[in-house]
Every structure is written in C-alpha cells, then in structure tokens.
Amino acid sequence: MKNIAVIGSGTMGNGIAHVFAQYGYKVSLIDVSEDALKKAVATIDKNLSRQVEKGTLTAENKQQALSLITTFTDLKAGIAQAELVVEAATENVDLKLNIFRELDAHAAPDAILASNTSSISITKIASVTKRPGKVIGMHFMNPVPVMKLVEVIRGYTTTDVVTQTVMELSRALGKVPVEVNDYPGFVANRILMPMINEAICTLHEGVAGVEEIDTVMKLGMAHPMGPLQLADFIGLDVCLAILQVLFQGFGNPKYAPCPLLVNMVQAGHRGVKSGAGFYAYA
Ligand code: CAA
C-alpha cells in the first residue's frame, strides 16, 4: 500500500497525514476549505521541524515527507488513487455517514475505508456503504506524531483480512495497534471519559480546585496531564459528545455527563481551541 487519502485537515487529520508522509506514503489531504489545508500544511511543517530540532528526523527526511503531501478540496479527485482512506472529519454522525456514502461511491472498489472516529459506531458507518467488510476504525491519539497507540476497531462485519492489513500498516508507521470490538466508546474512551467526567464532578461538587485535581492525578498517578487539562486539550465539546454516546449506548446513569461540563460547552468554553476551558489560553 502506497497511496493514502486523509479526509479532514484539523488537528487529527494533519497529524495522520504527517505520520503517513513521514513513513514514505503518498498522502492526499482533503478538506472543503483551502484555508484549512494551508494551515494544516504549515502545522505539519512546524511539527516536522520540531523532530528535526530534536534530531529524530533529518532535514532531508522532512523535505521528503512534505513533498509526499498533496492537498485537495475535491473529494473525488483526492481519493482517486487511494488504497486506504482515513476519515478524520468533525465528530458528527450525519456528516460522517454522508462522507462514507461518497467515499463508497467514488473510491476504488478494493480501497479500505477507515474512520478516526473517537466514538461513533463503525458498524453503523459501514452499513451505509456497499463494502461493509472493508470499513474499519483507525483511532489515532492526539498528538498523532507522538502517541504510539492506534486503536483498531473491528465493526460487526469488518473482515479478518482488512483488520490484519490495518494492524500491519499501523506497525509500519511505528505505532502499536490494539484490536478492539465495536461497542460504545471502544476501549480508550470508555475508560478515559468516565475518569474525566469524575474529575469534572469532583470540581463541580467543590471537593477541590482545578489545579489541585490535576496535580493529584499528575503526581499521584504519573499521568502526563491532569484530567481537566486533558479535557481542555481534547475539547470539552468532544468530551461531552463521547459521554453522550456512552450514556445512550449503555443506558447507564454512570455515564451521565456532569452538568458543569454541559454548561461550559453551552457557554462556548470548549477548551484550548476556544481560548477558555478549565484553564485560560492566550
Ligand atoms: N508533533 C510532533 N512532535 C510533538 C508534537 C506534535 N504535534 N507535540 C509534542 N511533540 C513532541 C515534542 O517535540 C517533545 O519531543 P521530545 O520528547 O523528543 O522532546 C515531546 O513531544 C513532548 O512534548 P513537550 O516537551 O512539548 O511537552 P510535554 O512533555 O508536556 O508533552 C504531550 C506533551 C505529549 C502532549 C504530553 O503532555 C502528553 O502525553 N499528554 C497526554 C496526551 C494524551 O493523553 N493524548 C490522548 C488524548 S485522547 C485522544 O486523542 C483520543 C480521543 O478520542 C479523545
């Protein structure tokens, strides 16, 4: 496999494009916005430069990686050569279903269609295509160039061959893939989001302040970021959306989003990207 298409050039999409290009794959990066594509390429350039400064990549490797990325605003043209498409668009069910209908109509018949969704059912996404066996979850973690995990999610109908291909491909990117089945939140967010929600409830109930909660988890549990800082980093709207998927999917009140989280998202405090969350960002 040599030709990859990535749909969506936001934080996850540009990170995924970065990693594929760094490991020698030809990448078509696709977004509806020309401006977003320009920003994405600038971000990839900056993040590759960090690696050059750290000595983990040569300047020549960086230029080679950049030369492997082509941007497109036209989805059909962008996926024409793709053997694998990785969708990393906004976390919205209807949007993703529409994208997969289009991918199915225009991608090569043998192409594997992967989604980087953090919680939407892969089985549901697969069901709108005529190739449900070739639809799979490829859930990268943020920041993609740094985090080793790829959560590989098998939909109800995903074939063994497609799963093995995506597992091997993830290893070829220097990642460690873990195969999981398609149930709400998969594994990563089924465990991470209740912890974040509990941290927010702990704050909401006045047990301790933001910095105190984060310090307990950073220094006491050796987490690189405290749960409130991590929630800001992921996006409070994304955390809320994932908790709602867990709550609806399992029908269990233990996943009910904390009212403080709901209020913050309604107020537009979505974390780092909005300038305000549990912390303030310049
Ligand atoms: N591209 C390339 N390199 C990057 C980078 C990027 N975007 N961001 C950071 N780095 C590199 C830095 O250059 C640095 O490299 P060295 O170790 O070689 O020096 C290294 O990563 C660490 O970065 P910093 O020194 O700037 O900062 P840090 O030590 O505070 O680490 C962090 C930053 C890696 C983000 C760390 O805080 C961390 O691991 N945080 C937790 C991240 C996490 O939990 N991610 C998962 C979120 S959940 C998710 O993504 C899925 C979901 O569905 C919600």
Image (tube, helix red, strand yellow):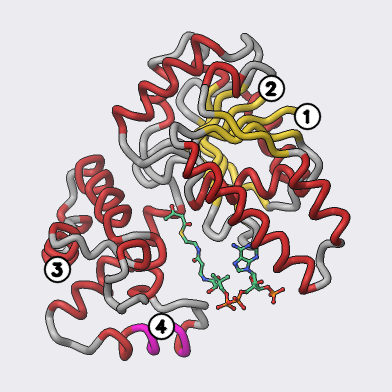
Mark 3 within 8 Å of ligand 1, using the beta carbon: no
Which amino acid lies under the numbered mark 1 shown in the image of this protein?
Lys
Q: How dense is the environment of label 3, judged by Cα within 10 Å: few (below 14), some, or many (20 and up)?
A: some
Residue underneath mark 1: 2
Report which quarter residue 86 is drawn in. top right
Cβ–Cβ under 8 Å for marks 4 and 1: no
SS class of the residue under badge 2? loop
SS class of the residue under badge 4? helix
Which amino acid lies under the numbered mark 2 shown in the image of this protein?
Glu
Q: Earlier in the sequence, mark 2 or mark 3?
A: 2
Closer mark to the observer between disc 1 and disc 3: 1
- Residue at coordinates 31% horizontally, 78% vertically from top-left? 280
- Residue at coordinates 59% horizontally, 51% vertically from top-left? 15
Closer mark to the observer between disc 2 and disc 4: 2
Q: In the rendering, which numbered label is found on residue 217?
A: 4
Residue underneath mark 2: 83
Q: How dense is the environment of label 4, judged by Cα within 10 Å: few (below 14), some, or many (20 and up)?
A: some
User: Considering the image in quadrants, where does the N terminus appear?
Assistant: top right
Q: CA distance from mark 2 to mark 4?
A: 42 Å
SS class of the residue under badge 3? helix
Q: Earlier in the sequence, mark 4 or mark 1?
A: 1
Q: How dense is the environment of label 2, judged by Cα within 10 Å: few (below 14), some, or many (20 and up)?
A: some
Q: CA distance from mark 1 to mark 3?
A: 46 Å
Work out whether 175 lies above or below 220: above
Q: Compare residues 12 and 222 and report the one nearer the observer.
A: 12
Q: Position of residue 260 (x, y in %)?
A: 14, 68
Cβ–Cβ under 8 Å for marks 2 and 3: no
Q: Compare residues 42 and 258 and report the one nearer the observer.
A: 42
Residue underneath mark 3: 260
Q: Which residues are magenta?
A: 214-219
Q: Earlier in the sequence, mark 1 or mark 3?
A: 1
